[in-house]
Amino acid sequence: MAQELVIRTAERGDAAVIAGFNIVVAAETEGKQLDEAVAAKGAVGLFDKPQYGFYIVAEKAGELVGSLMITYEWSDWRNGVYWWIQSAYVKPEFRGVGVFTAIYEYVRARAKEQAGVCGLRLYVEKENATAQRLYERLGMIEKSYKVYEESF
């Protein structure tokens, strides 16, 4: 499977599919129903604001089968930038065959080539044991932080 995949930086023309993926992942992971118009604007919006991050997609035979978003966090402790993996999604029929692993390895290699990138981070739902095992197999380590949020 991984040999048939094309992993690449997303282009503006991918935004509608990415927005659809984001709608599904929000429902699957958090039980949240995203507004389609807001999700569409949000996906396109990242292409208009590259200082916030970028998307990576996995493509098989011209079809997008997975994606994730990278956003940036400045670390004054490390004098570098963490790349945060967010909105990770793989279509159900392509799960368990190496799609996310291929995307992650692409991101890891790219991050290591970039001067000033000091690491990769992500957050995961507490109950998502499948994803947690995958992240651990990829070499990520669970940290002791909790995430707090105030939404506006």
Image (cartoon, grey):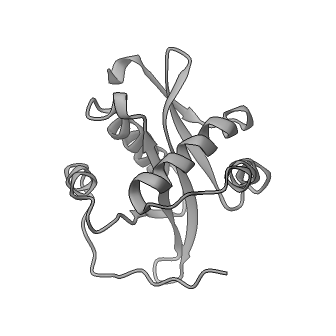
Q: Residue furthest top?
A: 61
User: Residue 3 in the image: x percent, y percent?
Assistant: 35, 19
User: Residue 68 in the image: x percent, y percent?
Assistant: 50, 47
Q: Residue furthest right?
A: 48
Instruction: Please give left or right for residue 135 compared with residue 5 in the image.
Output: left
State whether residue 20 is above or below residue 122: above
Q: Quadrant of the C terminus?
A: bottom right
Q: Which of the 4 image quarters holds residue 139?
A: bottom left
Nearest to the observer: residue 21 or residue 34 = 34
State whether residue 138 is above or below residue 126: above
Instruction: Please give left or right for residue 52 compared with residue 74 in the image.
Output: right
User: Residue 114 in the image: x percent, y percent?
Assistant: 54, 52
Identify the residue at image location x=34%, y=65%: 125
Nearest to the observer: residue 107 or residue 1 = 1
Q: Which of the 4 image quarters holds residue 98?
A: top left
User: Residue 126 in the image: x percent, y percent?
Assistant: 28, 69
Identify the residue at image location x=47%, y=83%: 77
State whether residue 63 is above or below residue 88: above
